[in-house]
Image: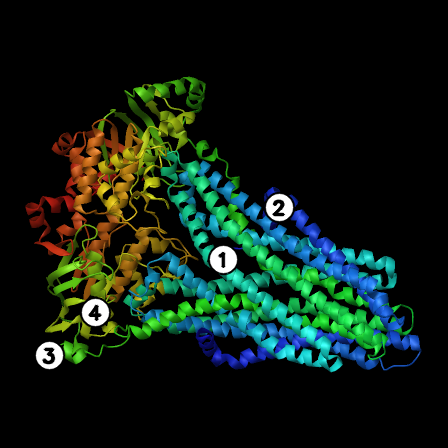
Amino acid sequence: MTIKIRPDRAQQMLLRGFLKRESKPAAGLLKFSIALGTVNALLMIASAYLLAQSVHLVMFENADLASVSHLLWPLAAFVLARGLLLAFSQRFSARAARNIKSAMRANLLEKLSQLGPHYTDKKGHGATLNMLHDGVEALHDYYANYLPSVAYSALVPLAILMVIFPTDWQAGLIFLFTAPLIPFFMILVGHKAEQLNQARWQQLAVLGNYFFDRVRGLTQLKLFDATKRELQQIAGISDDFRHATLSVLKIAFLSSFALEFLATISVALVAVIIGFRLFFGTLDFATGFVVLLLAPEFYLPLRKLGTHYHARLEGISAAGDMLEVLNTPISDAKNDSAVPNNELNKSKQDSQKENQALVNMNTAMTDIRVSRLSFTYPDSKEGIHNIELTLPTTGMVAFVGSSGAGKSTLFDCLLGFHPQVIPHISVNDEALSVKDIAAWQQQIAWIPQQPTLFYASIKDNITLAKPTASDAEIARAAEQAGVLTFIQSLENGFDTMLGEQGEGISGGQKQRIALARAFLKQAPILILDEPTAHLDSTTEGIVQRGINDYAKHHLVLVIAHRLNTLKQAAHVVVLAGGNLVQQGSYQELSDVQGPFSQLITGGDEVNAAQQSDIND
Amino acid sequence: MTNFLRLLHLCRPYYKAMLLGVFLTGLTVLANVGLLAISGWFLASMAAAGIAGVQMNYFTPAGIIRFLAIVRSASRYGERLVTHNATFLLLSEIRVNVFATLGKLNNQDLAMNRSADLFNRMQDDVDALDKFYLNVLLPMLVALVCVPIVITIIAGFNAQVAFICLGGIVLVGVCLPIRLSRKLGCSAGQQTQRSAELREALSEMLSGQRELALYQATNSQLAKCNAIQKDYNDLLDQRHKALADSDGLSLIVVQLAMLASVALLVPLVSSGQLPNVHLAMLSLFVLASFETVLTLPNAFIQLPVALSAAGRIFALHDKLAKSAGFDASETPQDLGSASPASLPQDITSDLGMGLGLQNVSYRYANAALDDLALNNVNITINAQQKVALVGPSGSGKSTLVNLLSGLWPEQQGRILFNAEYEVLAKAISFEKRTQLMGILAQQHHIFDGTIADNLHYAAPEASREQMQTACEQAQLGEWLYELPNGLNTRLGSAGRRMSQGQSRRLAIAQMLLRNPAILVLDEPTEGLDNQSKQAVMQAIMLAMSRSTVLCITHDPDLLQNMDKVIWLENGKVRGEGTHQALQAIHGEYLELTTRF
């Protein structure tokens, strides 16, 4: 239970429209389901006629069982048909909702992967996950229950009116007289009650949140010795909420009381008026009885609509986030680029040639250069400025800098996650273009600080980049990463399932499996962010050796957090405040007084950060 | 069954409100049944009287009809208020009960605190129990009261019809729902499992977005998500089909019961054994009698859900009864024997207090015999000494903190507080222990509530000035002044988002307010930028100059300013000395503490 700000009426209109458009994949099915439900209502009306007629015949025309059997048998058939219709109508509406949900989730996933990781980072991992999982599930009741009940609340009363009028216009008039109450009810339920209902759900959510939040922080409360105090607090708050909510409910229930009262008293009124007309002989009993049978059915769909109120609210508020994701233009990320237009155009024109260049790059990448690379996040001051960098094709290049120096941003740019700056990277003297990103990424293997292991077997996790790899290749990659003996010691070996649902493995082993994954790809460039957490020294040693070996024949770019890594690197690049402030070999950099030596000695590197911080 | 009885026991304090709810709900149902039956009878009688041309007293039945309509609406309103009130009362009872249990449970039994999955399940369990009265108990009691009344009245007219009606009611109200709930129960477990799988696949998709793109595996992960979604949907489909079928079957049973009654009564009417007017009334009566079990199917579906939820919640309670060895709120009984020559309640923090570990070992429950998380650790920290604890992951630092906090039970060795005389940590109450020793854990919880609320948890008596000062010392001053509501700013999921650094600093402010004799800090500067890191640590050291500090850190700046560094590896003390000394002797130590 989380509290969300409920959308206002204008937004609700917008979102309802959105939800209606999204129902397209199953619009036919949904309509079919509603059609079946309507046929069910029509059969209900017909059944009422048959029943009333048979009761009338037996009561006043002295008919016996045999002479009404021609009415009762169809009635029985109708009952069976209605049962089937009801079941199938509900099945179909559930299936329609399922189809819409599936399509929505698939669309959202695809859109999110198109928008790129930065969009997810910005929206928040947890919030996005909730939208994809619970949010999409919340649509089920909206489509399966709420939408059909809206249709029925219009169709069923109309059908009843249309059938009643030709039979007995006076009875029809009674319904017509009570019919204007329906829009009145609608407004009553829709307006005032909605606000109050919202208040009620929110109060409940607040109460739930408070409680579960305290449970989550229980250890904290224990350490503060505050559990006893909190217990009283919870009891007190529950009680306060009970009083507050009940006073809200007193009013919220009034509106449904009015609705119930009007519906019930209308039925009673119809009964009494018809009774008198029967008494004075202006109506035959069969018709009167039909009207009595149909009177409650006339109001039923509307009363049911009220029970699906919550489904509606949940669906609409869930839709808000989805609309936002689906409406974000993909080009958005590219529009805020710092790239001059002519450069983009140029690269477009050259794209033919570029593809050519990439094929060449596959065989011989002789020169990788980064020139005038700047990137700033639209909503923050952090970024990188005017990076000039020439990279060798083999060997290890280490990047260092305090947190916020721009290392991760630079790596995201190099990895192609900010398409707008990709023309600032050139291979063999040819600038890359947006179209080349996929081909460029094929040249790269990457290990982040905290690698993601998927809920799949170890084997599938390692072969992520190369599903066709042979067992020998996989074993070799695992061996290079120093994780082969560990995997073989597991009961199921390479088939052991990983992830929260599977076997739990330590951070060090995770890191090594990710390394095996990267080694298997045998990409010309390996980019990695060293873990800051202190792995045990054996793991660190193994990982270090594996990477050093790889660097003999490939280019390895590493965000270094350890002294040892720096010593191993052929070239060290120092970043501060988004600028490249120093580069050279470890020895060269250590020999001079500068940002690097300050960083290493852990002295007052505050100055270094301040000197170069051009943002402030 | 025992779970059901225990649940009833929980309801006992509120039986008056609950029974009133049953009474009003029953009244609503019976008024509705009466309204329909009497309307039918009234219509038939009026028609009969009209045809026969005889007078009849139509004022009374017409009045009764109107009266029942009013009774029905009014009792429905009252019923809803009363039942909701009872629900809230029970909700409060259950939550207080659950919280009390959890609060007393030893932290190792609280596996839930470590697994999001278990926590979510408990959340669902409590939610399910909240509605136990409204969804389960109320419909059952109402059916128990109303069905006999309705059936008896029908039996007064015709026993066979009553029999048919009872059969129909049992079928619709009990048999079909039980069958349905069995069906749903079978797939419910699988459904939770699949739902969790889907959540995980989606979560991986999001967190691994970069890796998937680089390894050209985005599409295969998309396909995997869709495949899992399909499996999950197939299960949901089964559920919805079962529900739809059950609804269809119920409709057939209700209508056929009515039809059978009519078929049974017609010969009686035509042979004159039954007044013709009764036919119209009884057919409506039978139809309306099913209202008594309208909410019963849902109750039978919810019952197993509520019972298994209750089972899990009560299991926590039972665990508490079993692990009576540890109790957060009470003084252990072995007080006299365990602490030689000391009166634990007298110890004060005025003179400063040291900390000692003697031969402390710890082994996790499912670890191998020789796999010790802590292996014979001996540490002595003098009063007011500032000591750092260093070591790679898995070296036993967090285990040590958990043992010191008293949240985990000690296994071997002794933990001592040293004042004028030595005091066994075990021998003092948990309450006293939390007063003496402040722990800033790595997983720090910021509560939903205002900043002041959060600070109050740490120090209930702190004044607003003290809070303000503590926040300033923790380098939160500037942030606080910029907030329009100051200390009254809401934090947590419903309030303002805090960065990792800010929540860390708030935790430090809490510690400063508590001002304990011994302060244990687990990576206090994690997530802070360089400037505030130094300012915060200076503030801590200044404010805690009279306290003993044990600080887990790898930050060279901090290590330099410590009186002593203890270097832990594989659960053992690998080295001890000043930072400079250790650096000079051990290359490995240098490597361990040099990070940027």
Q: Which of marks 1 and 4 is in front?
A: 1
Residue A466: x percent and y percent? 35, 33
Q: Give the amino acid type for the residue marked by disc 2 in the picture.
A: Lys
**First in sequence: mark 1 or mark 3?**
1
**Subunit ID for the residue under disc 4:** B
**First in sequence: mark 4 or mark 3?**
3
Same chain shared by disc 1 and disc 2:
no
Residue B28: x percent and y percent? 66, 75
Screen quadrant of the C terminus of chain A: top left
Q: Residue B436 carries which label?
A: 4
As measured in the structure, the alpha-carbon distance from the residue carrying label 4 to the one carrying label 3 is: 20 Å
As measured in the structure, the alpha-carbon distance from the residue carrying label 1 to the one carrying label 4 is: 52 Å
Q: Which mark is residue B187?
A: 1
**Residue identifier under label 2:** A20
**Residue identifier under label 3:** B341
Residue A375 in view of the camera: yes
Q: Nearer the viewer, residue A174 or B555?
A: A174
Residue B232: x percent and y percent? 49, 50
Q: In this view, does A108 lie to the left or right of B528?
A: right
As measured in the structure, the alpha-carbon distance from the residue carrying label 1 to the one carrying label 2 is: 31 Å
Q: Is residue B428 above or below residue B242?
A: below
Q: In this view, does B580 lie above or below B140?
A: above
Secondary structure of the residue carrying numbered label 2: helix
**Subunit ID for the residue under disc 3:** B
Q: Nearer the viewer, residue A615 or A260?
A: A260
As measured in the structure, the alpha-carbon distance from the residue carrying label 4 to the one carrying label 2 is: 62 Å
Residue A582 in view of the camera: no
Q: Give the amino acid type for the residue marked by disc 4 in the picture.
A: Leu
Secondary structure of the residue carrying numbered label 4: helix
Label 1 neighbour load within 10 Å: few <14, some 14-19, many 20+: some
Label 2 neighbour load within 10 Å: few <14, some 14-19, many 20+: few
